[in-house]
Each structure stands twice: as structure tokens, then as C-alpha cells.
């Protein structure tokens, strides 16, 4: 079945540091890929998405490229801010139209 | 404003009681979903509905029940049969039909935190 694997956390960075959060997936067909962000005590917000190979999703300085050859969708940001502190989930929408989530990773950014 | 509302934000239940969590959307979305979130874990699908008066079990449906009598509403009942109900519950919805880029994104409500005393 479909699965999503995220790197282990938590991650702690200083403000303005470079961020990479790894995400790899297993799925049949051509899934859509997503990054969601969850701030403390809140629901999930869509951060970015990509629907086909080589697509790049971007939003609020975050980027992720759909790499079919490596089955990856790594999240990057060039300069993180304290306000980026949150939990980040990688997810895919597979052939059965259901979302499969990774376990999430907590990012803390120090001033 | 269009969106998904969940109520209440916090809910306390005594052991052996049933409790119903509300989820309402005014996005005119066809499909609705319930997830459970536990600390350090991803989201797990409880139930989903792709059309009014129809719903399917997700990965962890035991001890839960749902109804879909209206397009806008998808309430979740946590029954006394659910052995470990303390968790954060999230409702989501999405459009159906149309292109892949416009219909495969789920949008989430703010969640309900259920605590069993």
C-alpha cells in the first residue's frame, strides 16, 4: 500500500538557517504530493503541493520538488524564521483518493 | 468566510459515555473526512464520505460512528466501545470531480481535543 516516510525529528535551528526536511514515498501510479503545516493547538494548513513529476510547489519561501526518480518530495526554505516553528507533515493522495501522511516532524526555530 | 468549523474545541467525557463531535463546512465540498491524531504520530483515517447518505470506514473505524444526512455536515460519534478515545480529532473536506489539481486537496478544520476523564 501507499506509505510516506519523513526524517526523524525534532529539528531545532537558529533563525535565518537553511531548512531541509526529507520526505520519501511509496505509491502506485502518479500520486499528488503535499506538505501541510500544523501550528500548536490548530488544524492542518496546506503549505504547498505538486501534482506531477518535476513540479515544484512553493509558498511563503518554502519549496519542494516532486522527484519521481527518487520518490522524494523534500521541503526546503532558505532562511527560517521563529514564526516557522510548527509541525510539518508530508502526505500523498494516491489512487484510492485517500491521503496518506508521514508521522510529522517538529521544527523549532530559535531567535 | 468559507471554511470548516469544528465544535467544541475542547471536550471532556466520562468513561462509558458516547460523545458527538461536530463538523460543518460551507465550501460546497462533496467529500468529508475524520482523522485522529495522537502525539508523535501522523493522522489516521477514521471514516470518510464522498456523497450524502454514504460513508466508508477508514483504517481505525472501530468504536466510532458517523452520519452524512446533509452535504454540509459530517458528525462523528465516539462511542463507549472506543477503548482509548483521548486524542485530537480533525475533520477535512475536498471537492469532487474536475481536474486533479483542483480536487485532490483536502482542507482541514481547527480540530477538537477530546479527553476522557
Image: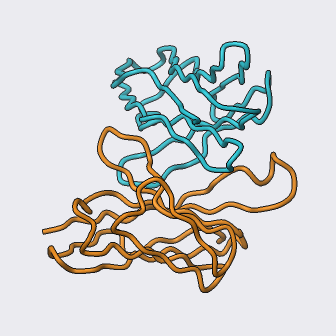
Q: Is residue A26 left or right of residue B63?
A: right
Residue A111 appears anywhere in the view: no
Q: Is residue A77 above or below residue B18?
A: above
Q: Is residue B10 above or below residue B75?
A: above
Residue A60 x, y percent position in the rendering: 63, 35
Q: Is residue B69 above or below residue A65?
A: below
Residue A62 x, y percent position in the rendering: 62, 28
Residue A9 x, y percent position in the rendering: 35, 24
Q: Colour of chain A?
A: cyan
Q: Is residue B110 left or right of residue B9?
A: right
Residue A30 x, y percent position in the rendering: 76, 33
Which of these two is toward me, A3 or A92? A3
Displayed quadrant of residue A57: top right
Quadrant including the N terminus of chain B:
bottom right
Q: Colour of chain B?
A: orange
Quadrant including the C terminus of chain B:
bottom left
Amino acid at each position: 500500500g501507499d506509505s510516506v516516510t519523513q526524517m526523524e525529528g525534532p529539528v531545532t535551528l537558529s533563525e535565518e538557517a537553511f531548512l531541509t526536511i526529507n520526505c520519501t514515498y511509496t505509491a502506485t501510479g502518479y500520486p499528488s504530493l503535499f506538505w501541510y503545516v500544523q501550528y500548536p493547538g490548530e488544524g492542518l494548513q496546506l503549505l504547498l503541493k505538486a501534482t506531477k513529476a518535476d513540479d515544484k510547489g512553493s509558498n511563503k519561501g518554502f519549496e519542494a520538488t516532486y522527484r519521481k526518480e527518487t520518490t522524494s518530495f523534500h521541503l526546503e526554505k532558505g532562511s527560517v524564521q521563529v514564526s516557522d516553528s510548527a509541525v510539518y507533515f508530508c502526505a500523498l493522495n494516491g489512487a484510492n483518493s485517500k491521503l496518506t501522511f508521514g508521522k510529522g516532524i517538529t521544527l523549532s526555530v530559535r531567535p | 468566510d468559507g471554511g470548516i468549523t469544528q465544535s467544541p474545541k475542547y471536550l471532556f467525557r466520562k468513561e462509558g459515555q458516547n460523545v458527538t463531535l461536530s463538523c460543518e463546512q460551507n465550501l460546497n465540498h462533496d467529500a468529508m473526512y475524520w482523522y485522529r491524531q495522537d502525539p508523535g504520530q501522523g493522522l489516521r483515517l477514521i471514516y470518510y464520505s464522498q456523497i450524502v447518505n454514504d460513508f466508508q470506514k477508514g483504517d481505525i473505524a472501530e468504536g466510532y460512528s458517523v452520519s452524512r444526512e446533509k452535504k454540509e455536515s459530517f458528525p462523528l460519534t465516539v462511542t463507549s466501545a472506543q477503548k482509548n478515545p483521548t486524542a485530537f480529532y480533525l475533520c477535512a473536506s475536498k471537492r469532487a470531480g474536475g481536474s486533479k489539481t483542483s480536487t485532490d486537496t483536502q482542507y482541514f478544520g481547527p480540530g477538537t481535543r477530546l479527553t476522557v476523564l
